Each structure stands twice: as structure tokens, then as C-alpha cells.
Image: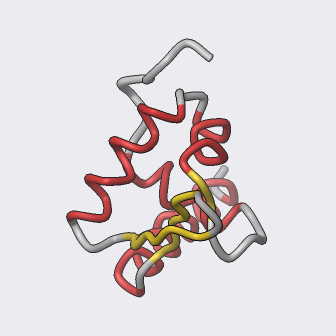
Amino acid sequence: MAGRDKHTADVDFLLCFLADPAPVLTAAEIGDMVDMTRQGAYARLKKLQDRGLIESDMKSGSRVWWLTSKGGQHAAAAAQSFDSDDSIG
């Protein structure tokens, strides 16, 4: 893993929650999905939490994250936009 990709958009983090069937994800799991270190993913997740898009809690010694209603709306809109782009042309 090469560290933070400066081109990884916030929506890419939100889409991780839609792509995985688990109700909650760890920073390490999300980092793997967006090709980023756990520490880099944690920092970005914290910013998304500050914006009210995700929430977190400690479970069994690990911090887990999940989408809020607001974050879910942003992720669903982005996913729908990607689906629409796929059907064009």
C-alpha cells in the first residue's frame, strides 16, 4: 500500500459502505478498499464524521464506522450517478 492517494474522493469512502455487506467497517478494511494505509483512512474517516456523514464507536477493542442517514443519501446519489454513467453510450 503506497499511502494516501490524493485523488481519492470523499465519496469513494462513502461508497465502501455500500459495496460491503457488513453493517460496520474498520479503518483498515476501508483503507484496503481505497488503497490507503489504516492511518490515512482513519484521518479521512474522522473528517467525514465531523461532517456528519458517518459515525463510529468502539466495539471489541476496534473502532468501527457506519453511514449516517446523510452519508447514506450522499453515497446512494453517487452510486446512482455512476450507474447512469454506465448506461450512457
Specify whether residue 75 is in view.
yes
Q: Residue furthest bottom?
A: 69
- Residue 28 in percent (x, y) is at 61, 42
Left or right of residue 44, residue 33 in this image: right
Q: Is residue 81 above or below residue 73?
A: above
Left or right of residue 70, residue 86 in this image: right
Q: Residue furthest top?
A: 2
Residue 59: name its quadrant. bottom right
What quarter of the picture does the N terminus occupy? top right
Q: Residue shown at 60%/54% (left/top)?
A: 26
Residue 20: name its quadrant. bottom right
- Residue 24 in percent (x, y) is at 63, 70
Pick the residue in front: 58 or 44.
58
Q: Which residue lies furthest to the right in this view?
A: 21
Pick the residue in front: 85 or 55.
55
Q: Residue shown at 49%/60% (left/top)?
A: 14
Q: Residue shown at 44%/33% (left/top)?
A: 39
Q: Residue shown at 66%/47% (left/top)?
A: 29
